[in-house]
């Protein structure tokens, strides 16, 4: 689960997906980008929060990709709020975080 900074300048879902794909190709090439098996499972432009899905071997590459993508989009950064082994765990954390914010 991640949050773009600043939230009031959050990109649209399609803009974020397009930038993630382009940046992954630029950083890792065609083979490397396909190996991380990245997908944007949920994203709220209003809250500036989203959930990315990948395998556990690619977490460090995805974190680098998020940082590089934030720079491409002109954002000041990306905050990683949580990492989990399951989407259910992240969804639960997202709901709990929504109650406290």
Image (spheres, grey):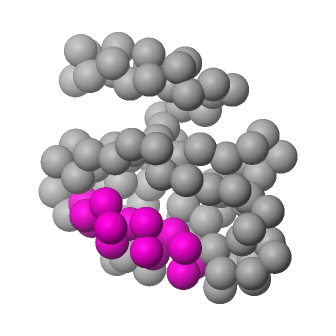
Q: Is residue 65 visible?
A: yes
| 92 to 50, vertically: above or below | above
Q: Image point 67% across, 47% down: which residue?
A: 54
| 61 to 95, vertically: above or below | below
Residue 2, given in percent of the width and then of the height, sits at 45, 44
Q: Image point 65% across, 62% down: which residue?
A: 64
The image quarter containing residue 74 is bottom left
Residue 31, given in percent of the width and then of the height, sits at 81, 76
Horizontal arrangement in the rendering, residue 62 relative to residue 44 (left or right): right
Q: Nearer the viewer, residue 2 or 57?
A: 57
Q: Is 89 contained in the magenta span?
A: no
Horizontal arrangement in the rendering, residue 22 relative to residue 75 (left or right): right
Q: Is residue 75 visible?
A: no
Q: Nearer the viewer, residue 75 or 50?
A: 50
Residue 40, given in percent of the width and then of the height, sits at 48, 51
Q: Is 14 contained in the magenta span?
A: yes
The image quarter containing residue 94 is top left
Horizontal arrangement in the rendering, residue 28 relative to residue 97 (left or right): right
Q: Main secondary structure of the magenta part?
A: helix
| 20 to 43, vertically: above or below | below
Number of dots carrying numbers? 0
| 45 to 17, vertically: above or below | above
Residue 30, given in percent of the width and then of the height, sits at 75, 81
| Quadrant showing the C terminus | top left
Q: Which residues are magenta?
A: 10-23
Q: Image point 17% across, 48% down: which residue?
A: 46
Q: Image point 24% across, 15% down: which residue?
A: 99
């Amino acid at each position: 689960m991640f949050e773009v900074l600043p939230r009031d300048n959050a990109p649209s879902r399609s803009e974020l997906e397009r930038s993630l794909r382009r940046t992954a190709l630029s950083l890792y090439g065609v083979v490397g980008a396909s190996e991380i098996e990245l997908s944007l499972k949920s994203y709220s432009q209003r809250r500036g929060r989203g959930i990315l899905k990948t395998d556990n071997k690619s977490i460090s590459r995805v974190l680098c990709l998020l940082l590089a993508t934030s720079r491409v989009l002109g954002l000041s950064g990306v905050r990683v709020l949580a990492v989990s082994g399951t989407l259910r765990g992240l969804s639960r954390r997202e709901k709990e975080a929504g109650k406290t914010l």
